[in-house]
Image (cartoon, coloured by chain):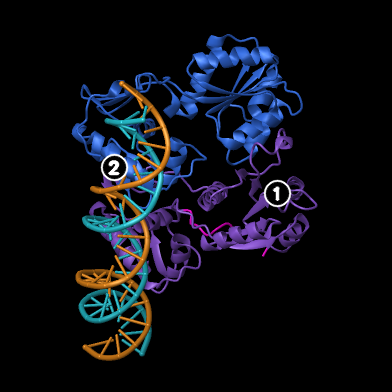
Chain colours: A purple, B blue, C cyan, D orange
Amino acid sequence: MEMANLPTQNLYSMEANLAANILLVEDEPAIQDLISMNLRQAGHSPILSSDAGEALEKVRDTLPDLILVDWMLPGMSGIELIRRLRNNDRTRNVPIIMLTARADENDKLAGLDSGADDYITKPFSIRELNARIKAVLRRRAPQITEDKVVFKHLTLDPSTHRVNANGQDLNLGPTEFKLLHFFMTHPERVYSRTQILDQVWGDHVFIEERTVDVHIRRLRAALESTGAASLLQTVRGAGYRLTAIA
Amino acid sequence: MEMANLPTQNLYSMEANLAANILLVEDEPAIQDLISMNLRQAGHSPILSSDAGEALEKVRDTLPDLILVDWMLPGMSGIELIRRLRNNDRTRNVPIIMLTARADENDKLAGLDSGADDYITKPFSIRELNARIKAVLRRRAPQITEDKVVFKHLTLDPSTHRVNANGQDLNLGPTEFKLLHFFMTHPERVYSRTQILDQVWGDHVFIEERTVDVHIRRLRAALESTGAASLLQTVRGAGYRLTAIA
DNA sequence: TGTATTTGTAACAATTTCGTCACATTGAGT
DNA sequence: ACTCAATGTGACGAAATTGTTACAAATACA
């Protein structure tokens, strides 16, 4: 379990479901409680530690998706902790948000760049913290493909979110769009319903396999007018396939 | 408020036409003064810092629209500063122009290689600096430029803060104006609410995503009489888009 | 200061999309 | 032709997304 698995998201839409393992390094129990409770509420899984040493230990155990570090810590400071994390190949790329005191208090902070990905000054609202977390995770998440995909006379452009067939724009729902995007980027190959669910809906979704059939049907209906419906074939006993060979 | 649109477009004529926030990193006070004065004159809002550390601190609060970095700085060099900025996901996309005394071609290459968008050698004329700034902004952040934007029968002029449609001026609030400006400089592309918030409101503002919807609605209402309201489309599950196509 | 405008948010309504089911149809093997 | 499993199809309620409105706080202006 060495991978820093970023929150589950699929590559065919911008939505990122952020349910992350977040390591919180905070020595004040009250604040630790407050933050961890809210992290949980936001759907994350907080890992708690009250000093830098403990944090390093926890990190050794499992690599979190994000680390929240208080500036003021007993013993090793937050800065030093970050420096160590950045020095280690394994932890180098884990995004870090630093919790600092008011800007006017930390004069000695001037000129120091700890290498955190973002900062948030106390006191902060929970909503603001959530917003920062979301932003950092989103920036760190794998880039979605924005390349146009062309297949026969079909053109799908993620950046404009349009599907064009012979100059005619198709109107697709979000799921059908993702489904078509997936097939167009993986043509000529058969995918089982399970594979399609994993790739298009996302890992570990609990959905009836037959639901795929329904969406295939809807996609076919949308493609009907373009004549491309027949290219989305059923492979009995195996799954579905998009092929250029009618 | 759905009130009759009274002609009040002069309300904003006092505003500076082009308010780009430009972070200047320059240790020599004389040059710092000179440049900042001229930036102000050109309508920008300079943020001053005399070394790399201070610059990083300023960036921490709010992202500027552009950064001017002197090559020679006390302590951390300009190159190193740029490297750090480019290393952080949050600051990665801020355009940077490097200032240097050296005319050495190798240095120029090193500068561009480190991630600067442009490079200008001292001594330089104010005119040249302004030209470079404008060019970089036009390329990287067209919505902060003062250039007139034309889209279909809509004309938006940032310098006069006016939007004209078929010879008729529209009355837009500041936010709707910026929103429209953004869409007109980035047509056809779909932007999520989050992206719109980042681009139009700013990166560290934390505002409900749904607020975007409300402003979209207000903008649509303002565009209603021009027939352009239907060009500002909703893309379900993805965001909004300004399109010329139906 | 008082007034008007703008802005962000919440609450509610309207709309679209999703997942599932029941039932119809197909196809392969016997 | 028959059987049976796999797939197609239409419908429906639930869930998710977006539209709309009202309102209070913030802001600008006179």
Measure the C-alpha gap from mark 2 to mark 1: 44 Å
Residue B201 drawn at (x, y percent): 44, 37
Disc 1, SS: loop
Amino acid tagged 1: Arg
Vertical side of B19 occupied by A153: above or below = below
Q: Residues within 10 Å of mark 1 (few under 14, many from 20)?
A: some
Residue C29 drawn at (x, y percent): 38, 84
Residue at mark 1? A92
Disc 2, SS: helix
Question: Where does the magenta region start and end?
Answer: A1-11
Q: Chain of mark 1?
A: A
Quadrant position of the N terminus of chain A in the picture: bottom right
Mark 2 vs mark 1, foreground winner is 2
Residue A26 drawn at (x, y percent): 68, 55
Front in this rendered view, residue A242 or A52: A52
Quadrant position of the C terminus of chain A in the picture: bottom left
A3 within the magenta span: yes
* Residue A122 appears in the figure: yes
> Residue visible at 24% across and 40% down?
B230
Front in this rendered view, residue A163 or B76: B76
Residue at mark 2? B217
* Residue B246 appears in the figure: no
Vertical side of B214 occupied by A40: above or below = below
B21 within the magenta span: no
Residue A19 sits in which quadrant? bottom right
Vertical side of A25 occupied by B35: above or below = above
Front in this rendered view, residue B218 or B100: B218
* B130 lies left or right of B29: left
> Residue visible at 67% across and 51% down?
A69
Same subunit under labels 2 and 1? no
Amino acid tagged 2: Arg
Residue A172 drawn at (x, y percent): 31, 54
